[in-house]
């Protein structure tokens, strides 16, 4: 009867051995399982021969067999590699339990055992058959478990793949974002440089005029000196005095125009200086006037046919305002350029009969100084009016404007100086921008 | 010979008056000045027949020199005064426009007065 136990142990190990064949745990388990198989057989033979002549040999063999089987089952149950075998391993417990009961009863109540022998045998055989019956089910179960874990592994793989894809996309987007931010900074910088470039053309022209006068009056004065010498030689003192007066006047004009040029250059140096961000008391009238003419000449340097009437209406005794002159100057420049553009566009549409007029005026308004820039150009349509302060918004054709002028102006006036920008406009009639700077 | 000089810069006046001092003294030339195209037209309205030569700047606020030129050619055809354009922008476009509108000559600033004197001589003759 104990034979069943050793047989079960052998079969179990055999099944395990077959299952790991050609898997990746084959090398790990083959030696153990192969030797265990032999071990079972040897143990049986050895025990059999050892206890053959013992009175209780049956009981001892039974107990030994059950113990061996139990040991093997417990060992395999703990092994992770055989974690799907639980169902089949547990099927051995009835046999093991019956074995221990048999053995103990045989030892302790042998007569009872002999009387009920049939039942005990039936129990052993039944448990043995039970193991077999559980095999088919367990095989199916193991298959299902294996497929489920394979599916899980596949899903994990897919998830990891997707995650990798998304991470890649996220990194690309982050890079693109950084690039966009850099480009934006570059555009803002180039806008500033562009406005500086426009200034340069206007400034160059502005300087040319006074320089011409300096040259011309110097030449004339040289001629006059010659004439004066002649008159003195002739003895015509009166004429010589008249000429002398002219020469004096010329020199005064030379000085005047020289100073004009000097002022322009100083102004230009100020513009090209990196904005200091420090506010200083500034004459708004002078600032607006200077940039007004600069904007006009700048535009004319680019477009010789451009012409417009410039009107200025500066309030007398306007108090000084604490501003960063380069920044506010840039705002004025932008507004003037826009105004000139608007009237030019209207002239293109309406022809020579249209008289472009651009006006700048200043006035004190309560706690603010108001600067009005008005033009009789094409105006701003309602649909567009809300967008004009947005960065990169422009109605100009591609390449002609960055669309940053007004948004930078807004930043400077509102955020930088706590002021206001307002616009009042009528399409094809006029536009008026009001800058308010706090006193 | 009466010459009208049109330029928005007031300082051209003493310049011309001094440069042509001799000629003015000898009553060979007489200069009048207008500070804008509009002023020039008003002057011409009154004294058209007297003016023989008009020297005009092109780049002026308000009415440009080119516009003044075309007005002169349109309104004052008999006799047509000689009109010479003076300008700081001596480029092709300006030159073309001036000639197209009937200018007799085209001079660039800074004015070469000797050249101008030569040209005036040929007109007088």
Image (tube, coloured by chain):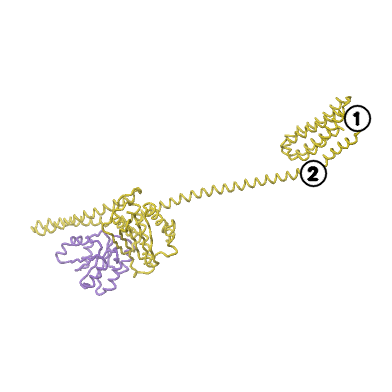
Dot 2: few (<14), some (14–19), or many (≥20) neighbours within 10 Å? few
Chain for disc number 2: A
Specify the chain shown as purple: B
Measured from the top left, where is residue A114 in percent x and y? 91, 31
Q: Residue furthest left?
A: A235
Q: Residue furthest bottom?
A: B78
* Whether residue A437 is visible: yes
* Whether residue A6 is visible: no
Residue behind mark 1: A111
Residue A80's image quarter? top right
- Residue positioned 90% across, 30% down in the render: A111
The numbered mark at residue A38 is none
- Residue positioned 31% across, 53% down in the render: A321
A85 sits to left or right of A48: left
> In which quadrant will I find the N terminus of chain A?
top right
> In which quadrant will I find the C terminus of chain A?
bottom left
A189 sits to left or right of A9: left
Measured from the top left, where is residue A371 in percent x and y? 33, 59
Measured from the top left, where is residue B9 in percent x and y? 24, 61
Specify the chain shown as yellow: A
Residue behind mark 2: A137
């Amino acid at each position: 009867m104990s034979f069943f136990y050793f047989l079960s142990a052998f079969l179990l190990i055999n099944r395990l051995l077959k299952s790991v064949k050609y898997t990746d745990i084959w090398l790990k388990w083959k030696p153990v399982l192969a030797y265990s198989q032999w071990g079972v057989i040897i143990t049986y033979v050895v025990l059999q021969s050892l206890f053959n002549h013992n009175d209780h040999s049956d009981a001892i063999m039974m107990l030994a067999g059950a113990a061996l089987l139990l040991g093997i089952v417990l060992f395999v149950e703990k092994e992770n590699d055989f974690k799907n075998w639980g169902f089949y391993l547990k099927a051995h417990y009835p046999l093991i339990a019956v074995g221990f009961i048999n053995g103990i009863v045989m030892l302790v109540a042998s007569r009872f055992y002999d009387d009920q022998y049939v039942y005990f045998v039936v129990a052993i055989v039944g448990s043995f058959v039970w193991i077999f019956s559980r095999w088919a089910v367990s095989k199916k179960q193991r298959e299902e478990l294996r497929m489920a874990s394979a599916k899980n592994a596949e899903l994990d793989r897919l998830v990891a793949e997707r995650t990798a894809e998304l991470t890649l996309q996220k990194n690309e987007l982050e890079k693109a974002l950084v690039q966009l931010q850099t480009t934006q900074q570059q555009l803002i910088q180039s806008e500033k440089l562009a406005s500086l470039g426009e200034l340069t053309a206007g400034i160059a022209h502005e300087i040319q005029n006074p320089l011409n006068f300096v040259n011309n009056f110097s030449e004339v004065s040289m001629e006059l000196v010659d004439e004066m010498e002649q008159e003195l030689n002739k003895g015509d003192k009166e004429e010589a005095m008249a000429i002398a007066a002219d020469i004096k006047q010329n020199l005064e004009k030379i000085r005047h125009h020289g100073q004009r040029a000097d002022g322009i250059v100083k102004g230009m140096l100020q513009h090209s200086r990196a904005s200091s961000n420090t506010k200083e008391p500034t004459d708004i009238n002078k600032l607006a006037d200077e940039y007004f003419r600069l904007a006009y000449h700048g535009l004319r340097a680019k477009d010789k046919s451009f012409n417009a009437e410039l009107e200025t209406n500066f309030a007398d005794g306007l108090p000084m305002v604490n501003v960063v002159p380069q920044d506010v100057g840039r705002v004025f420049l932008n507004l003037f350029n826009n105004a000139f553009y608007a009237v030019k566009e209207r002239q293109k549409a309406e022809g020579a009969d249209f008289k472009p007029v651009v006006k700048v005026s200043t006035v004190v308004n309560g706690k603010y100084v108001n600067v009005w820039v008005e033009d009789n150009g094409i105006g701003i349509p309602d649909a567009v009016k809300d967008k004009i302060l947005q960065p990169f918004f422009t109605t100009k054709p591609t390449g002609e404007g960055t669309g940053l002028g007004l948004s930078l102006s807004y930043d400077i006036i509102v955020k930088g100086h706590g002021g206001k920008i307002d616009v009042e406009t009528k399409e094809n009639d006029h536009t008026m921008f009001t800058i308010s700077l706090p006193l | 010979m009466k010459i009208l000089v049109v330029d928005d810069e007031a300082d051209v006046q003493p310049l011309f008056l001094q440069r042509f001092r001799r000629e003015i003294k000898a009553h060979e030339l007489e200069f009048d000045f207008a500070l804008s195209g509009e002023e020039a037209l008003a002057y011409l309205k009154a004294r058209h027949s007297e003016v023989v030569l008009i020297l005009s700047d092109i780049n002026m606020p308000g009415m440009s020199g080119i516009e003044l030129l075309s007005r002169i050619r349109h309104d004052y055809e008999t006799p047509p005064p000689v009109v010479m354009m003076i300008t700081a922008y001596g480029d092709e476009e300006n030159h073309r426009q001036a000639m197209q509108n009937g200018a007799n000559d085209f001079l660039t600033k800074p004015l070469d007065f000797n050249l101008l004197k030569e040209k005036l001589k040929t007109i007088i003759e």
